[in-house]
Amino acid sequence: SLAARRVPPSIADGIAVKDIGNYPREIITRLVDKMVTVTDVEVADAIIRHLELEHSVIEGAAAAGLAALYQRALPEQYK
């Protein structure tokens, strides 16, 4: 659901928001077929995995998409 909610602390604090704005909501409603969630542990694992493979550090919000890929949470067409 895209409803406003309480947001607990997260390693991916850049994307942990109570509510999204009207413009992003319109885009998401129109273009997004499926949303997946990942845990902070999965995001942390993605950060470490990226560091090991690419020798660069990424922040939590950037690692969320990688975490979804690593957890095989995305449809096959996006892998």
Image: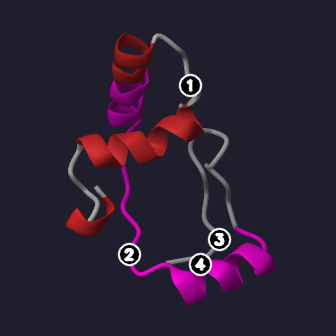
Q: Identify the amino acid type marked 2.
A: Lys
Q: Identify the amino acid type marked 1.
A: Ile
* Discs 1/3, front: 1
Residues under numbered marks 3 and 2 in contact, where contact means CB atoms less than 8 Å apart: no
Label 3 – label 4 distance at C-alpha: 15 Å
Label 3 – label 2 distance at C-alpha: 18 Å
> N-terminal of the two: label 3 or label 4?
3
**What percent of the width, then of the height, locates residue 65?**
44, 47
Q: What kind of element bears circle 3?
A: loop
Task: Tell me the number on the disc at residue 4.
Answer: 3
Viewer-closest of 36 and 49: 49
> N-terminal of the two: label 4 or label 2?
4
Task: Tell me the number on the disc at residue 58.
Answer: 1
> N-terminal of the two: label 1 or label 4?
4
The residue segment tinted magenta is: 20-48
Going 43% across and 17% down the picture, which residue do you hit?
A: 54
* Discs 3/4, front: 4
Label 4 – label 2 distance at C-alpha: 10 Å
For the residue carrying disc 1, how many other residues have a C-alpha within 10 Å: few (<14), some (14-19), or many (20+)? few
Circle 2 residue: 34
Task: Tell me the number on the disc at residue 28.
Answer: 4
Going 41% across and 34% down the picture, which residue do you hit?
A: 43
Label 1 – label 3 distance at C-alpha: 27 Å
Magenta stretch: helix, strand or loop mostly: helix
Seen in the picture, residue 1 relative to 35 is either above or below; the reply is: below
